[in-house]
């Protein structure tokens, strides 16, 4: 978690991206869609991207090794290591191109139940402000994160209404 300075601002604020969304589904279902590869690989990524999973082990210390295929044909090697899992409340992970990527970033996901709805928040913390800025400017990380959560919303709606399996 971020530390807080005496003025109340996060000590990592200049290295963070925070994206959140409210989803019309119970927290357990949203958490399941985020933690089971049969679901995750069907909605993960921004507009026009697809995902191919090489391996997936959802446990602390486990990893998701996958390739994101961009709409322009570019392949992006991706690696996520799960650092903390508290079903159905919280996930912490390290995300990079490989297990040894020096530019890997941390993400903290929270799933808050609001009655029959769920508020998901993704807080990403980069090693440096420059890496955060590069992710925002070159890779459109904010827009991509928003689009990814929109895909999650649509996918979970399909699960609730029986149109996804």
Image (cartoon, rainbow, N blue to C red):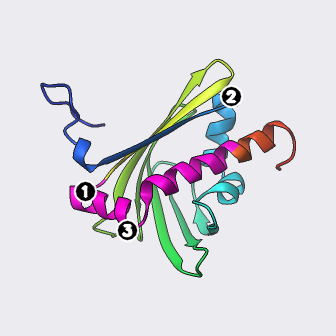
Judged from this view, the residue extending furthest toward the right is 162
Which span of residues is magenta-colored? 126-153
In the rendered view, would you say 116 is above or below 120? above
Return the residue at label 1.
Answer: 127
Q: Position of residue 117 (x, y in %)?
A: 65, 25
Q: Which secondary structure dominates the residues rendered in magenta?
A: helix
Q: Quadrant of the N terminus?
A: top left
Q: Position of residue 152 (x, y in %)?
A: 65, 47
Quadrant in the picture for residue 141: bottom left
As for residue 55 lying within the magenta part, the answer is no
Return the residue at label 3.
Answer: 138
Please tell me whether mark 3 sits on a helix, a strand or a loop: loop
Q: Are marks 3 and 2 in contact (CB under 8 Å)?
A: no
Q: Is residue 16 visible?
A: yes
Judged from this view, the residue extending furthest toward the top is 115
Query: What residue is rendered at 58% in x and 53% in y?
Result: 148
Separation of residues labelled 1 and 2 (CA atoms): 33 Å
Q: Nearer the viewer, residue 9 or 84?
A: 9
Q: Residues within 10 Å of mark 2 (few under 14, many from 20)?
A: some
Return the residue at label 2.
Answer: 26
In the rendered view, would you say 142 is above or below 78? above
Query: What residue is rendered at 47% in x and 59% in y?
Result: 80
Query: What residue is rendered at 14% in x and 25% in y?
Result: 7
Please tell me whether mark 2 sits on a helix, a strand or a loop: loop
Q: Are marks 1 and 2 in contact (CB under 8 Å)?
A: no
16 relative to 161 in the view: left or right: left
């Amino acid at each position: 978690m971020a530390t807080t300075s005496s003025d109340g601002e996060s000590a990592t604020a200049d290295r963070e991206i925070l994206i959140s969304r409210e989803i019309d589904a119970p927290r357990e279902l949203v958490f399941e869609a985020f933690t089971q590869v049969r679901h995750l690989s069907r909605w993960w990524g921004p507009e026009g991207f697809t995902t191919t999973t090489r391996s997936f082990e959802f446990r602390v210390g486990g990893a998701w090794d996958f390739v994101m295929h961009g709409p322009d044909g570019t392949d992006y090697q991706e690696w996520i290591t799960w650092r903390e899992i508290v079903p159905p409340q919280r996930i912490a992970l390290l995300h990079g191109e490989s297990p040894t990527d020096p530019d890997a970033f941390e993400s903290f996901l929270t799933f808050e139940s609001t009655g029959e709805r769920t508020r998901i928040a993704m807080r990403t913390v980069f090693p440096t402000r420059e890496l955060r800025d590069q992710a925002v400017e070159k890779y459109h990380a904010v827009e991509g994160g928003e689009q990814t959560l929109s895909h999650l919303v649509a996918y979970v709606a399909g699960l609730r209404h029986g149109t996804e399996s």
